Image (spheres, rainbow, N blue to C red):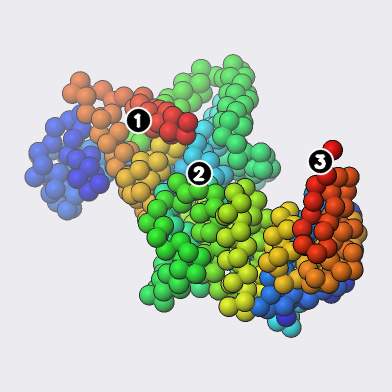
Protein backbone atom coordinates (compact mmCIF):
# COMPACT_ATOMS: atom_id res chain seq x y z
CA UNK A 1 0.00 0.00 0.00
CA UNK A 2 3.00 2.28 0.59
CA UNK A 3 5.51 1.11 -1.97
CA UNK A 4 9.05 2.14 -2.82
CA UNK A 5 9.97 1.23 -6.39
CA UNK A 6 13.64 1.49 -7.41
CA UNK A 7 13.87 4.49 -5.12
CA UNK A 8 17.22 6.26 -5.08
CA UNK A 9 17.69 8.86 -2.38
CA UNK A 10 20.29 11.60 -2.26
CA UNK A 11 21.00 15.27 -2.78
CA UNK A 12 21.69 16.74 -6.19
CA UNK A 13 24.38 14.56 -7.75
CA UNK A 14 25.20 12.66 -4.58
CA UNK A 15 23.47 9.29 -4.26
CA UNK A 16 22.94 8.25 -0.64
CA UNK A 17 21.05 4.97 -1.00
CA UNK A 18 20.41 3.52 -4.49
CA UNK A 19 17.57 1.36 -5.71
CA UNK A 20 15.41 0.63 -2.66
CA UNK A 21 12.53 -1.75 -3.33
CA UNK A 22 10.20 -2.29 -0.41
CA UNK A 23 6.65 -2.15 0.85
CA UNK A 24 5.30 -0.78 4.12
CA UNK A 25 2.18 -2.58 5.31
CA UNK A 26 -0.80 -1.19 7.20
CA UNK A 27 -1.14 -2.52 10.72
CA UNK A 28 2.63 -2.85 11.13
CA UNK A 29 5.17 -0.90 13.11
CA UNK A 30 8.35 -0.72 11.04
CA UNK A 31 11.63 0.58 12.48
CA UNK A 32 14.53 1.90 10.48
CA UNK A 33 17.91 1.19 12.09
CA UNK A 34 21.37 2.22 11.03
CA UNK A 35 24.45 4.06 12.18
CA UNK A 36 24.64 7.85 12.11
CA UNK A 37 25.17 9.32 8.66
CA UNK A 38 24.13 6.21 6.75
CA UNK A 39 21.11 7.93 5.18
CA UNK A 40 18.17 7.25 7.48
CA UNK A 41 17.10 10.87 7.59
CA UNK A 42 17.59 11.24 3.85
CA UNK A 43 15.27 8.30 3.25
CA UNK A 44 12.69 9.61 5.70
CA UNK A 45 12.82 13.09 4.17
CA UNK A 46 12.32 11.57 0.74
CA UNK A 47 9.29 9.60 1.97
CA UNK A 48 7.90 12.77 3.59
CA UNK A 49 8.34 14.51 0.17
CA UNK A 50 10.60 17.16 1.70
CA UNK A 51 13.29 15.91 -0.64
CA UNK A 52 12.71 14.78 -4.25
CA UNK A 53 13.85 11.24 -5.07
CA UNK A 54 16.80 11.03 -7.47
CA UNK A 55 15.24 8.05 -9.22
CA UNK A 56 12.32 5.71 -8.84
CA UNK A 57 8.89 6.22 -7.38
CA UNK A 58 6.95 6.14 -4.14
CA UNK A 59 3.47 4.70 -4.63
CA UNK A 60 0.69 5.33 -2.17
CA UNK A 61 -2.70 3.67 -2.57
CA UNK A 62 -1.85 2.87 -6.17
CA UNK A 63 -0.81 6.41 -7.14
CA UNK A 64 2.73 7.83 -7.45
CA UNK A 65 3.02 10.53 -4.77
CA UNK A 66 4.74 12.90 -7.18
CA UNK A 67 1.36 13.32 -8.90
CA UNK A 68 -0.48 14.35 -5.71
CA UNK A 69 -1.09 17.94 -4.60
CA UNK A 70 0.05 19.35 -1.25
CA UNK A 71 -3.41 19.09 0.22
CA UNK A 72 -3.97 15.53 -1.05
CA UNK A 73 -0.63 14.49 0.42
CA UNK A 74 -1.39 16.13 3.75
CA UNK A 75 -4.40 13.83 4.08
CA UNK A 76 -2.32 10.72 3.35
CA UNK A 77 1.06 11.16 5.03
CA UNK A 78 1.55 12.58 8.52
CA UNK A 79 4.99 13.31 9.92
CA UNK A 80 6.53 13.79 13.34
CA UNK A 81 9.93 15.47 13.14
CA UNK A 82 12.86 15.70 15.54
CA UNK A 83 12.68 19.49 15.53
CA UNK A 84 10.44 20.81 18.30
CA UNK A 85 8.19 23.68 17.28
CA UNK A 86 8.84 26.66 19.54
CA UNK A 87 5.50 28.43 19.85
CA UNK A 88 4.29 30.74 22.54
CA UNK A 89 0.68 30.92 23.68
CA UNK A 90 -0.50 27.73 22.02
CA UNK A 91 -2.48 25.27 24.10
CA UNK A 92 -2.11 21.53 23.66
CA UNK A 93 -5.62 21.41 22.24
CA UNK A 94 -4.78 24.10 19.67
CA UNK A 95 -1.63 22.25 18.67
CA UNK A 96 -3.49 18.97 18.16
CA UNK A 97 -6.14 20.99 16.31
CA UNK A 98 -3.45 22.10 13.82
CA UNK A 99 -3.57 18.52 12.57
CA UNK A 100 -7.02 19.28 11.19
CA UNK A 101 -5.66 22.02 8.87
CA UNK A 102 -5.97 19.94 5.70
CA UNK A 103 -9.69 19.59 6.37
CA UNK A 104 -10.62 23.07 7.63
CA UNK A 105 -11.84 25.97 5.57
CA UNK A 106 -10.33 29.32 4.68
CA UNK A 107 -9.99 30.66 8.23
CA UNK A 108 -8.87 27.36 9.75
CA UNK A 109 -11.80 27.26 12.14
CA UNK A 110 -12.57 23.82 13.64
CA UNK A 111 -16.06 22.40 13.23
CA UNK A 112 -17.85 20.24 15.78
CA UNK A 113 -16.63 17.18 13.90
CA UNK A 114 -13.03 18.45 13.85
CA UNK A 115 -13.19 19.00 17.60
CA UNK A 116 -14.37 15.45 18.09
CA UNK A 117 -11.41 14.12 16.11
CA UNK A 118 -9.08 16.29 18.20
CA UNK A 119 -10.52 14.93 21.46
CA UNK A 120 -10.22 11.35 20.20
CA UNK A 121 -6.63 11.90 19.08
CA UNK A 122 -5.70 13.30 22.49
CA UNK A 123 -7.28 10.31 24.23
CA UNK A 124 -5.44 7.86 21.97
CA UNK A 125 -2.11 9.53 22.68
CA UNK A 126 -2.88 9.67 26.40
CA UNK A 127 -2.68 13.44 26.76
CA UNK A 128 -6.34 14.29 27.38
CA UNK A 129 -5.45 15.73 30.79
CA UNK A 130 -2.93 18.16 29.28
CA UNK A 131 -5.55 19.71 27.00
CA UNK A 132 -5.40 23.22 28.46
CA UNK A 133 -1.67 23.38 29.18
CA UNK A 134 0.55 25.64 27.09
CA UNK A 135 2.60 23.61 24.61
CA UNK A 136 5.91 25.29 25.46
CA UNK A 137 5.61 24.45 29.16
CA UNK A 138 5.56 20.68 28.53
CA UNK A 139 8.39 18.19 28.99
CA UNK A 140 10.06 16.60 25.95
CA UNK A 141 8.09 13.38 26.36
CA UNK A 142 4.78 15.20 26.68
CA UNK A 143 5.54 17.37 23.66
CA UNK A 144 6.36 14.31 21.60
CA UNK A 145 3.01 12.79 22.55
CA UNK A 146 1.24 16.01 21.60
CA UNK A 147 2.90 15.90 18.18
CA UNK A 148 1.71 12.30 17.84
CA UNK A 149 -1.81 13.34 18.82
CA UNK A 150 -1.57 16.08 16.18
CA UNK A 151 -0.60 13.57 13.51
CA UNK A 152 -3.46 11.29 14.63
CA UNK A 153 -5.89 14.18 14.29
CA UNK A 154 -4.59 14.55 10.74
CA UNK A 155 -6.09 11.10 10.07
CA UNK A 156 -3.51 9.89 7.59
CA UNK A 157 -3.14 6.21 6.74
CA UNK A 158 0.65 6.66 6.84
CA UNK A 159 2.64 8.11 9.75
CA UNK A 160 6.38 8.72 9.46
CA UNK A 161 8.45 9.60 12.52
CA UNK A 162 12.05 10.79 12.66
CA UNK A 163 13.65 9.46 15.85
CA UNK A 164 10.56 9.79 18.05
CA UNK A 165 12.40 8.30 21.02
CA UNK A 166 15.42 10.61 20.95
CA UNK A 167 15.72 12.99 23.93
CA UNK A 168 13.36 10.85 26.05
CA UNK A 169 14.17 9.06 29.29
CA UNK A 170 13.96 5.27 29.30
CA UNK A 171 10.37 4.81 30.60
CA UNK A 172 9.12 7.43 28.13
CA UNK A 173 10.93 5.70 25.27
CA UNK A 174 9.20 2.43 26.11
CA UNK A 175 5.85 4.15 26.48
CA UNK A 176 6.29 5.92 23.14
CA UNK A 177 7.18 2.73 21.24
CA UNK A 178 4.33 0.78 22.82
CA UNK A 179 1.93 3.57 21.94
CA UNK A 180 3.07 3.55 18.32
CA UNK A 181 2.84 -0.24 18.13
CA UNK A 182 -0.68 -0.16 19.55
CA UNK A 183 -1.73 2.56 17.09
CA UNK A 184 -0.36 0.60 14.15
CA UNK A 185 -2.17 -2.56 15.19
CA UNK A 186 -5.46 -1.08 16.31
CA UNK A 187 -5.90 1.56 13.62
CA UNK A 188 -4.33 -0.38 10.76
CA UNK A 189 -1.92 2.44 9.99
CA UNK A 190 1.45 2.29 8.28
CA UNK A 191 3.85 3.48 10.97
CA UNK A 192 7.48 3.91 10.01
CA UNK A 193 10.11 5.37 12.32
CA UNK A 194 13.85 5.78 12.54
CA UNK A 195 15.55 5.07 15.84
CA UNK A 196 18.83 4.31 17.57
CA UNK A 197 17.17 2.30 20.33
CA UNK A 198 18.01 -1.06 18.82
CA UNK A 199 16.79 -3.34 21.60
CA UNK A 200 13.45 -1.65 21.87
CA UNK A 201 13.00 -1.73 18.10
CA UNK A 202 13.80 -5.47 18.13
CA UNK A 203 11.21 -6.20 20.75
CA UNK A 204 8.39 -3.96 19.61
CA UNK A 205 8.61 -3.64 15.82
CA UNK A 206 6.80 -5.91 13.43
CA UNK A 207 9.45 -5.37 10.79
CA UNK A 208 12.94 -3.93 10.71
CA UNK A 209 14.78 -2.06 7.99
CA UNK A 210 18.51 -2.16 8.62
CA UNK A 211 20.42 0.41 6.65
CA UNK A 212 24.00 -0.14 5.57
CA UNK A 213 25.91 2.22 3.31
CA UNK A 214 24.23 1.78 -0.07
CA UNK A 215 21.70 -0.90 0.88
CA UNK A 216 18.69 -1.64 3.06
CA UNK A 217 18.01 -5.09 4.53
CA UNK A 218 14.43 -5.81 5.49
CA UNK A 219 12.85 -8.51 7.58
CA UNK A 220 11.05 -9.49 10.75
CA UNK A 221 13.18 -9.14 13.90
CA UNK A 222 13.37 -12.92 14.43
CA UNK A 223 14.35 -13.57 10.79
CA UNK A 224 17.09 -10.96 10.82
CA UNK A 225 18.34 -12.28 14.11
CA UNK A 226 18.56 -15.86 12.75
CA UNK A 227 20.21 -14.87 9.49
CA UNK A 228 22.95 -13.09 11.40
CA UNK A 229 22.04 -9.68 9.96
CA UNK A 230 21.50 -8.20 13.40
CA UNK A 231 24.86 -9.43 14.63
CA UNK A 232 26.49 -7.98 11.52
CA UNK A 233 24.81 -4.65 12.19
CA UNK A 234 25.55 -4.43 15.89
CA UNK A 235 28.86 -6.17 16.25
CA UNK A 236 31.69 -3.82 16.91
CA UNK A 237 34.63 -3.78 19.25
CA UNK A 238 33.32 -4.74 22.66
CA UNK A 239 29.71 -5.40 21.67
CA UNK A 240 28.23 -8.86 21.17
CA UNK A 241 24.73 -9.77 20.09
CA UNK A 242 22.97 -12.49 22.08
CA UNK A 243 20.78 -14.48 19.67
CA UNK A 244 18.68 -16.08 22.37
CA UNK A 245 17.94 -13.04 24.48
CA UNK A 246 17.62 -10.72 21.43
CA UNK A 247 19.79 -8.18 23.19
CA UNK A 248 23.40 -7.10 23.12
CA UNK A 249 26.13 -7.36 25.68
CA UNK A 250 28.99 -5.00 26.25
CA UNK A 251 32.42 -6.33 27.24
CA UNK A 252 34.00 -4.61 30.20
CA UNK A 253 37.34 -3.66 28.65
CA UNK B 1 -10.24 53.03 18.47
CA UNK B 2 -13.38 54.85 17.48
CA UNK B 3 -12.98 57.14 20.46
CA UNK B 4 -9.39 57.86 19.51
CA UNK B 5 -10.38 58.49 15.91
CA UNK B 6 -13.03 60.94 17.02
CA UNK B 7 -10.58 62.58 19.41
CA UNK B 8 -8.18 62.99 16.52
CA UNK B 9 -10.80 64.95 14.65
CA UNK B 10 -11.78 67.06 17.64
CA UNK B 11 -8.41 68.12 19.01
CA UNK B 12 -5.90 70.13 17.16
CA UNK B 13 -3.74 73.21 17.39
CA UNK B 14 -6.84 75.27 16.70
CA UNK B 15 -9.94 74.96 18.86
CA UNK B 16 -13.07 74.16 16.91
CA UNK B 17 -16.31 73.44 18.79
CA UNK B 18 -17.51 69.82 18.71
CA UNK B 19 -20.87 70.64 17.18
CA UNK B 20 -19.21 72.40 14.28
CA UNK B 21 -16.81 69.50 13.65
CA UNK B 22 -19.78 67.13 13.40
CA UNK B 23 -21.58 69.55 11.15
CA UNK B 24 -18.60 69.84 8.82
CA UNK B 25 -18.10 66.10 8.64
CA UNK B 26 -21.73 65.58 7.76
CA UNK B 27 -21.23 67.88 4.82
CA UNK B 28 -22.61 71.04 6.38
CA UNK B 29 -21.36 74.52 5.60
CA UNK B 30 -20.18 77.03 8.18
CA UNK B 31 -20.39 80.45 6.62
CA UNK B 32 -18.54 82.44 9.27
CA UNK B 33 -15.46 80.16 9.54
CA UNK B 34 -14.45 78.81 6.14
CA UNK B 35 -10.97 78.05 7.49
CA UNK B 36 -12.47 75.53 9.97
CA UNK B 37 -13.87 73.52 7.10
CA UNK B 38 -10.52 73.56 5.44
CA UNK B 39 -8.76 72.35 8.60
CA UNK B 40 -11.17 69.51 9.22
CA UNK B 41 -11.48 68.30 5.65
CA UNK B 42 -8.00 68.92 4.35
CA UNK B 43 -5.96 68.31 7.46
CA UNK B 44 -7.51 66.50 10.40
CA UNK B 45 -9.57 63.93 8.50
CA UNK B 46 -6.81 62.78 6.13
CA UNK B 47 -4.33 62.83 9.00
CA UNK B 48 -6.58 60.64 11.15
CA UNK B 49 -7.09 58.14 8.33
CA UNK B 50 -3.38 58.15 7.50
CA UNK B 51 -2.41 57.41 11.09
CA UNK B 52 -5.05 54.72 11.42
CA UNK B 53 -4.01 52.83 8.28
CA UNK B 54 -0.33 53.29 9.01
CA UNK B 55 -0.76 51.69 12.43
CA UNK B 56 -2.74 48.79 11.01
CA UNK B 57 -0.20 48.18 8.27
CA UNK B 58 2.97 48.36 10.31
CA UNK B 59 1.66 46.11 13.06
CA UNK B 60 0.42 43.48 10.57
CA UNK B 61 3.85 43.60 8.94
CA UNK B 62 5.49 43.03 12.29
CA UNK B 63 3.23 40.08 13.05
CA UNK B 64 3.79 38.45 9.66
CA UNK B 65 7.56 38.88 9.83
CA UNK B 66 7.75 37.53 13.37
CA UNK B 67 5.86 34.43 12.25
CA UNK B 68 7.79 34.03 9.01
CA UNK B 69 11.21 34.27 10.65
CA UNK B 70 9.92 32.54 13.79
CA UNK B 71 11.70 35.24 15.71
CA UNK B 72 10.01 37.55 18.22
CA UNK B 73 12.38 40.41 17.42
CA UNK B 74 11.57 40.58 13.72
CA UNK B 75 9.88 43.71 12.51
CA UNK B 76 10.08 46.10 9.58
CA UNK B 77 12.45 48.52 11.32
CA UNK B 78 14.68 46.04 13.13
CA UNK B 79 15.17 43.97 9.99
CA UNK B 80 16.18 47.03 8.03
CA UNK B 81 13.28 46.80 5.58
CA UNK B 82 12.34 50.38 6.15
CA UNK B 83 16.02 51.28 5.88
CA UNK B 84 15.79 49.90 2.35
CA UNK B 85 12.72 52.00 1.65
CA UNK B 86 14.58 54.90 3.22
CA UNK B 87 17.50 54.45 0.87
CA UNK B 88 15.18 54.35 -2.11
CA UNK B 89 13.57 57.59 -1.01
CA UNK B 90 16.93 59.21 -0.28
CA UNK B 91 18.18 58.28 -3.74
CA UNK B 92 15.19 59.95 -5.34
CA UNK B 93 14.98 62.99 -3.09
CA UNK B 94 18.66 63.78 -2.83
CA UNK B 95 20.16 62.56 -6.07
CA UNK B 96 17.47 63.33 -8.58
CA UNK B 97 15.71 66.10 -6.72
CA UNK B 98 12.40 64.33 -7.03
CA UNK B 99 12.02 63.76 -10.76
CA UNK B 100 13.37 61.03 -12.98
CA UNK B 101 12.94 60.86 -16.73
CA UNK B 102 13.25 57.48 -18.33
CA UNK B 103 13.03 57.99 -22.07
CA UNK B 104 9.64 59.47 -22.71
CA UNK B 105 8.33 58.37 -19.32
CA UNK B 106 8.65 61.00 -16.67
CA UNK B 107 7.84 60.39 -13.05
CA UNK B 108 7.77 63.03 -10.43
CA UNK B 109 6.93 63.69 -6.82
CA UNK B 110 5.08 61.27 -4.69
CA UNK B 111 4.60 58.47 -7.15
CA UNK B 112 8.33 58.32 -7.67
CA UNK B 113 9.02 58.32 -3.95
CA UNK B 114 6.61 55.40 -3.49
CA UNK B 115 8.13 53.37 -6.30
CA UNK B 116 11.61 54.07 -4.94
CA UNK B 117 10.62 53.10 -1.40
CA UNK B 118 9.02 49.94 -2.73
CA UNK B 119 12.08 48.90 -4.71
CA UNK B 120 14.33 49.63 -1.76
CA UNK B 121 12.16 47.61 0.60
CA UNK B 122 11.92 44.70 -1.83
CA UNK B 123 15.70 44.58 -2.29
CA UNK B 124 16.19 44.26 1.46
CA UNK B 125 13.42 41.65 1.68
CA UNK B 126 15.13 39.57 -1.00
CA UNK B 127 18.44 39.87 0.79
CA UNK B 128 16.83 38.78 4.05
CA UNK B 129 15.19 35.86 2.28
CA UNK B 130 18.55 34.68 0.98
CA UNK B 131 19.92 34.87 4.50
CA UNK B 132 16.78 33.55 6.14
CA UNK B 133 18.19 30.13 6.99
CA UNK B 134 20.69 31.85 9.29
CA UNK B 135 18.16 34.22 10.77
CA UNK B 136 16.36 31.80 13.12
CA UNK B 137 18.88 32.88 15.69
CA UNK B 138 17.81 36.12 17.30
CA UNK B 139 21.28 37.58 17.63
CA UNK B 140 22.08 36.95 13.97
CA UNK B 141 18.83 38.59 12.97
CA UNK B 142 19.54 41.71 14.97
CA UNK B 143 23.11 41.91 13.72
CA UNK B 144 21.96 41.59 10.12
CA UNK B 145 19.38 44.33 10.65
CA UNK B 146 21.96 46.62 12.23
CA UNK B 147 24.43 45.96 9.41
CA UNK B 148 21.81 46.71 6.79
CA UNK B 149 20.88 49.91 8.59
CA UNK B 150 24.54 50.97 8.80
CA UNK B 151 25.18 50.31 5.14
CA UNK B 152 22.07 52.16 3.99
CA UNK B 153 22.89 54.88 6.52
CA UNK B 154 26.33 55.41 5.08
CA UNK B 155 25.00 55.54 1.53
CA UNK B 156 22.41 58.06 2.67
CA UNK B 157 25.11 60.16 4.37
CA UNK B 158 27.05 60.15 1.14
CA UNK B 159 23.96 61.27 -0.75
CA UNK B 160 23.28 63.94 1.84
CA UNK B 161 26.82 65.20 1.49
CA UNK B 162 26.49 65.73 -2.21
CA UNK B 163 22.89 66.92 -2.27
CA UNK B 164 21.42 70.39 -2.34
CA UNK B 165 20.46 72.15 0.86
CA UNK B 166 16.78 72.00 0.02
CA UNK B 167 16.95 68.27 -0.69
CA UNK B 168 18.65 67.58 2.62
CA UNK B 169 16.08 69.59 4.51
CA UNK B 170 13.17 67.83 2.80
CA UNK B 171 14.71 64.48 3.49
CA UNK B 172 15.34 65.16 7.19
CA UNK B 173 11.83 66.42 7.78
CA UNK B 174 10.46 63.36 6.00
CA UNK B 175 12.65 61.12 8.16
CA UNK B 176 11.11 62.36 11.39
CA UNK B 177 7.83 60.68 10.61
CA UNK B 178 4.69 62.57 9.89
CA UNK B 179 1.06 61.60 9.47
CA UNK B 180 0.11 64.93 7.95
CA UNK B 181 2.02 64.42 4.71
CA UNK B 182 -0.92 62.76 2.98
CA UNK B 183 -3.22 65.40 1.59
CA UNK B 184 -6.80 64.75 0.59
CA UNK B 185 -5.99 64.21 -3.09
CA UNK B 186 -3.23 61.70 -2.33
CA UNK B 187 -5.34 59.90 0.25
CA UNK B 188 -7.14 57.56 -2.22
CA UNK B 189 -3.86 56.17 -3.56
CA UNK B 190 -2.50 55.69 -0.05
CA UNK B 191 -5.70 53.95 1.07
CA UNK B 192 -5.87 51.67 -1.97
CA UNK B 193 -2.27 50.54 -1.59
CA UNK B 194 -2.53 49.85 2.12
CA UNK B 195 -5.97 48.28 2.08
CA UNK B 196 -4.88 45.89 -0.67
CA UNK B 197 -1.79 45.00 1.37
CA UNK B 198 -3.92 44.42 4.45
CA UNK B 199 -6.39 42.28 2.52
CA UNK B 200 -3.46 40.26 1.23
CA UNK B 201 -2.38 39.73 4.83
CA UNK B 202 -5.86 38.59 5.84
CA UNK B 203 -5.77 35.94 3.09
CA UNK B 204 -2.72 34.40 4.77
CA UNK B 205 -4.28 33.79 8.18
CA UNK B 206 -4.47 30.01 7.94
CA UNK B 207 -1.05 29.30 6.40
CA UNK B 208 0.51 31.68 8.95
CA UNK B 209 -0.75 29.46 11.77
CA UNK B 210 0.86 26.43 10.14
CA UNK B 211 4.15 28.26 9.54
CA UNK B 212 4.40 28.80 13.31
CA UNK B 213 5.20 25.08 13.59
CA UNK B 214 8.11 25.35 11.17
CA UNK B 215 8.30 25.02 7.40
CA UNK B 216 8.34 21.25 7.31
CA UNK B 217 5.34 20.77 9.53
CA UNK B 218 3.56 23.48 7.56
CA UNK B 219 4.19 21.74 4.27
CA UNK B 220 3.06 18.44 5.80
CA UNK B 221 -0.20 20.19 6.71
CA UNK B 222 -0.78 20.97 3.05
CA UNK B 223 0.60 24.53 2.98
CA UNK B 224 2.55 25.59 -0.07
CA UNK B 225 5.37 27.16 1.92
CA UNK B 226 7.12 28.84 -1.01
CA UNK B 227 4.02 30.53 -2.31
CA UNK B 228 2.99 31.63 1.18
CA UNK B 229 6.41 33.11 1.83
CA UNK B 230 6.44 35.02 -1.43
CA UNK B 231 2.97 36.40 -0.70
CA UNK B 232 4.04 37.39 2.78
CA UNK B 233 7.09 39.22 1.53
CA UNK B 234 5.09 40.95 -1.16
CA UNK B 235 2.46 42.13 1.34
CA UNK B 236 4.95 43.30 3.95
CA UNK B 237 7.04 44.97 1.24
CA UNK B 238 3.99 46.82 -0.09
CA UNK B 239 2.80 47.88 3.35
CA UNK B 240 6.20 48.96 4.66
CA UNK B 241 7.13 50.76 1.48
CA UNK B 242 3.85 52.65 1.24
CA UNK B 243 3.81 53.77 4.87
CA UNK B 244 7.48 54.69 4.72
CA UNK B 245 7.06 56.67 1.53
CA UNK B 246 4.06 58.63 2.79
CA UNK B 247 4.69 58.94 6.52
CA UNK B 248 8.44 58.53 6.81
CA UNK B 249 10.10 55.70 8.71
CA UNK B 250 7.91 55.10 11.75
CA UNK B 251 10.13 53.12 14.09
CA UNK B 252 9.40 50.31 16.56
CA UNK B 253 5.65 50.19 16.04
CA UNK B 254 5.68 47.11 13.84
CA UNK B 255 7.82 45.26 16.33
CA UNK B 256 6.01 46.20 19.51
CA UNK B 257 2.33 45.96 18.60
CA UNK B 258 2.17 42.21 17.81
CA UNK B 259 3.68 41.52 21.24
CA UNK B 260 1.11 43.71 22.93
CA UNK B 261 -1.57 41.82 20.99
CA UNK B 262 -0.14 38.44 22.02
CA UNK B 263 0.09 39.47 25.64
CA UNK B 264 -3.48 40.70 25.79
CA UNK B 265 -5.11 38.02 23.63
CA UNK B 266 -3.00 35.09 24.96
CA UNK B 267 -3.33 33.15 21.72
CA UNK B 268 -1.19 32.19 18.76
CA UNK B 269 -4.00 31.95 16.23
CA UNK B 270 -3.59 34.50 13.49
CA UNK B 271 -7.29 34.85 12.82
CA UNK B 272 -7.37 36.59 16.22
CA UNK B 273 -3.85 38.02 16.32
CA UNK B 274 -3.97 39.74 12.95
CA UNK B 275 -7.14 41.76 13.57
CA UNK B 276 -5.97 42.29 17.16
CA UNK B 277 -2.66 43.72 15.98
CA UNK B 278 -4.37 45.88 13.38
CA UNK B 279 -6.74 47.29 15.97
CA UNK B 280 -4.04 47.95 18.55
CA UNK B 281 -1.69 49.37 15.95
CA UNK B 282 -4.40 51.77 14.80
CA UNK B 283 -5.11 52.79 18.41
CA UNK B 284 -1.44 53.42 19.06
CA UNK B 285 -0.84 55.56 16.00
CA UNK B 286 -4.01 57.54 16.66
CA UNK B 287 -2.83 58.08 20.21
CA UNK B 288 0.62 59.13 19.00
CA UNK B 289 -0.92 61.45 16.49
CA UNK B 290 -3.08 62.95 19.20
CA UNK B 291 -0.14 63.41 21.56
CA UNK B 292 1.91 64.93 18.77
CA UNK B 293 -0.65 67.56 17.91
CA UNK B 294 -2.03 68.13 21.39
CA UNK B 295 0.70 70.13 23.07
CA UNK B 296 -1.16 73.35 23.77
CA UNK B 297 1.65 75.48 22.41
CA UNK B 298 0.21 74.85 18.99
CA UNK B 299 3.39 73.34 17.55
CA UNK B 300 3.50 69.75 16.30
CA UNK B 301 6.19 67.27 17.35
CA UNK B 302 7.38 64.48 15.00
CA UNK B 303 5.90 61.01 15.43
CA UNK B 304 9.27 59.34 15.74
CA UNK B 305 9.84 61.13 19.01
CA UNK B 306 7.06 59.06 20.56
CA UNK B 307 7.12 55.62 18.95
CA UNK B 308 10.48 54.47 20.39
CA UNK B 309 9.24 55.46 23.83
CA UNK B 310 6.49 52.86 23.40
CA UNK B 311 8.49 50.33 21.42
CA UNK B 312 11.72 50.15 23.38
CA UNK B 313 10.21 48.89 26.67
CA UNK B 314 8.36 46.14 24.79
CA UNK B 315 11.56 44.96 23.11
CA UNK B 316 13.38 44.94 26.44
CA UNK B 317 10.55 42.97 27.98
CA UNK B 318 10.65 40.36 25.21
CA UNK B 319 14.43 39.94 25.52
CA UNK B 320 14.33 39.71 29.31
CA UNK B 321 11.44 37.24 29.29
CA UNK B 322 13.47 34.90 27.07
CA UNK B 323 16.14 34.48 29.75
Q: Position of residue B122 (x, y in %)?
A: 60, 43
The label shown at residue A210 is: none
Mark 3 is surrounded, within 10 Å at the Cα level, by few (under 14), some (14 to 19) or many (20 or more) other residues, namely: few
Observer-nearest of A159 and B44: A159
Residue at 47%, 59% (x, y): give it: A95
Of labels 2 and 3, the one closer to you: 3
Residue at 37%, 56% (x, y): give it: A132
Instruction: Report whether B215 appears left or right of B37.
Output: right
Give the residue at mark 1.
Answer: B310
Confirm or deny contact between disc 2 and disc 3 (CB under 8 A).
Answer: no
For mark 1, give the secondary structure: helix
Give the residue at mark 2.
Answer: B66
Q: Position of residue B271 (x, y in %)?
A: 40, 58
Mark 2 is surrounded, within 10 Å at the Cα level, by few (under 14), some (14 to 19) or many (20 or more) other residues, namely: many
Does residue B308 sit above or below A59 in this rendering?
above
Residue at 78%, 76% (x, y): give it: A23
For mark 3, give the secondary structure: loop
Are discs 1 and 3 both within one chain? no
**CA distance separating discs 1 and 2:** 18 Å
Give the residue at mark 3.
Answer: A252
Amino acid sequence: MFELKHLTTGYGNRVVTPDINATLNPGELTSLLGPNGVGKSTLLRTLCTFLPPLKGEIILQGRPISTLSNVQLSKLIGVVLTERPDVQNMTVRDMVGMGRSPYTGFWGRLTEEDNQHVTEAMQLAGIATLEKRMFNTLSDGERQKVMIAKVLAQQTPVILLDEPTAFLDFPSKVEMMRLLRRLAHEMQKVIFLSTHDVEMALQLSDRLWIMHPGEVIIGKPAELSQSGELSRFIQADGIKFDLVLMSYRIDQC
Amino acid sequence: MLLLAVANLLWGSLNIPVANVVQILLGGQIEEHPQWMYIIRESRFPQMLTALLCGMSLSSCGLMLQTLFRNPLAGPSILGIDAGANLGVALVMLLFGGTVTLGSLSMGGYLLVIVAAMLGALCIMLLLLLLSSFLRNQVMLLITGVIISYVTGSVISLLNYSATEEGVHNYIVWGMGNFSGVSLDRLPLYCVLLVSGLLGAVLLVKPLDAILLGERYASNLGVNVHRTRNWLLLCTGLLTATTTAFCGPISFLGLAVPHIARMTLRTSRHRLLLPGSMLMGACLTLLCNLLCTMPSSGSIIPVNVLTPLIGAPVILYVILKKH
